[in-house]
């Protein structure tokens, strides 16, 4: 009977730990338990101190990095024949190990300020708040402002959101590597797409509102203590619900059940902003006409829940706000129907679909 199972490039549904079987639920329970303990308890503090680390967060960063390295090995053993993926995954791991763990750990040892240069607002939701900017050295404050408000959207316009979501971001890096065994679990249903649009833009509105009220508190808080208390409460609620529950407990804990991009697809406010810019920009996936054989490999491996096959069958090149440009759909296509591009010629494709275009 095993020979009757899913054939093709991979057979993930035969493995219980990759197909929502008992082992998958156990792994999810362990991950959720770990994140609950990390965010709301201090059992990891003595472990971190025993290892010579300043806090449980550096222990978490070390475990995070190890998870990415192990996941990268797993990923490259299957897809390392592609130069794009070798470079992309190497960049993911390098950014995490060097910029998101080593550099923040070393900076205070050299008399500097602990800082994570690979994260920008609104993903790092407190980066643009007055208290954060005033505490940082001037060059880091300028870096945070320019990176968040200018550099990130500009790169998304020219390169697509993949420059960040699929190459730099630590959340995306963990999904690319440690989460790769579960990428096929991401729902492609219309209901999931509708939930995605509602949820991710709700969180985007929430982080903009929270940032605005906290900035306003810095301007008038001394004269309006009630408003200052409201602003502080708004920040705490956002940090709890989005920064802890959605980004950590749900976003990573449910990898084995919902796929690795639950946070990125449904809740990440930075992904929402970059996705909107991407729709106006040059990035698209080009479809070679009349070549799709409807094998479904592209849709099966899309971790963002995009039904790529539907576009290929319709001979439609496309730009989707959700797409993180991982390139897996093009990688698994047996006929080379799909190609990731950053070209002005995308305007014709967008106009045909009724999307907003820019006359460049």
Image: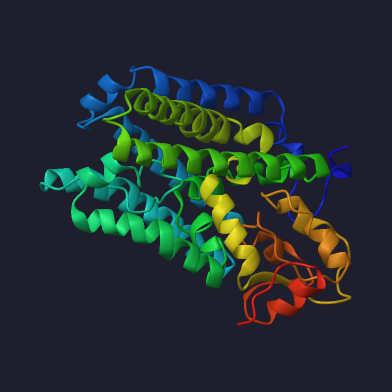
Q: Tell me if I can see residue 106 in this picture.
A: yes
Left or right: residue 331 versus residue 162 is right
- Residue at the spot x=89%, y=43% of the render? 4
Locate residue 73, reporting x and y percent. 50, 51
Relative vertical location of residue 103 with respect to residue 239 in this rendering, above or below: below
Residue at figure coordinates x 42%, y 20% from the top left:
37
Q: Please state if 39 lies on the left or on the right of 299 as rendered.
A: left
Q: Position of residue 266 (x, y in %)?
A: 63, 41
The quadrant of the picture occupied by the N terminus is top right
Residue 199 percent across, percent down from the top left: 65, 39
| Colouring style | rainbow
Q: Nearer the viewer, residue 331 or 11?
A: 331
Instruction: Judge whether 358 appears above or below 126 on screen.
Output: below
On the image, the x and y values in percent for residue 231 come to 40, 30
Residue sitting farthest toward the left: 111
| Residue in the foreground of this view, choosing between 134 and 285 | 134
The number of numbered discs placed on residues in the rendered structure image is: 0
Tell which of 167 and 80 is nearer to you: 167
């Amino acid at each position: 009977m095993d020979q009757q199972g899913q054939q093709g490039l991979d057979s993930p549904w035969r493995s219980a730990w990759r197909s929502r079987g008992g082992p998958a639920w156990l792994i999810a329970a362990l991950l959720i338990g770990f994140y609950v303990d990390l965010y709301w308890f201090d059992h990891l503090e003595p472990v971190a101190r025993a290892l010579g680390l300043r806090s449980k967060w550096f222990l978490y960063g070390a475990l995070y990095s190890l998870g990415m390295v192990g996941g990268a090995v797993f990923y490259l053993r299957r897809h390392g024949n592609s130069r794009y993926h070798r470079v992309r995954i190497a960049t993911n791991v390098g950014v995490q190990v060097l910029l998101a763990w080593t550099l923040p750990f070393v900076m205070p040892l050299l008399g500097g300020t602990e800082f994570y240069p690979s994260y920008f607002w609104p993903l790092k939701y407190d980066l643009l708040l007055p208290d954060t900017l005033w505490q940082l050295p001037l060059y880091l404050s300028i870096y945070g402002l320019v990176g968040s408000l200018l550099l990130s959207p500009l790169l998304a316009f020219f390169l697509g959101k993949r420059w960040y979501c699929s190459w730099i971001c630590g959340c995306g890096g963990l999904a690319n590597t440690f989460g790769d065994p579960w990428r096929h679990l991401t729902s492609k249903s219309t209901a999931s797409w509708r939930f995605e649009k509602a949820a991710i833009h709700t969180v985007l509105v929430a982080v903009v509102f929270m940032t605005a009220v906290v900035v306003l508190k810095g301007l008038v808080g001394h004269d309006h203590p009630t408003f200052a208390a409201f602003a502080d409460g708004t920040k705490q609620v956002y940090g709890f619900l989005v920064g802890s529950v959605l980004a950590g407990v749900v976003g990573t804990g449910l990898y084995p059940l919902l796929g690795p991009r639950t946070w990125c697809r449904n809740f990440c406010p930075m992904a929402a902003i970059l996705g909107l810019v991407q729709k106006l920009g040059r990035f698209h996936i080009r479809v070679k006409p009349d070549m799709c054989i409807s094998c479904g490999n592209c849709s099966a491996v899309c971790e963002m829940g995009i039904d790529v096959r539907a576009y290929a069958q319709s001979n439609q090149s496309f730009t989707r706000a959700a797409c993180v440009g991982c390139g897996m759909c093009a990688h698994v296509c047996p006929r080379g129907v799909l190609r990731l591009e950053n070209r002005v010629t995308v305007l014709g494709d967008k106009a045909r679909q009724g999307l907003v275009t820019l006359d460049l």
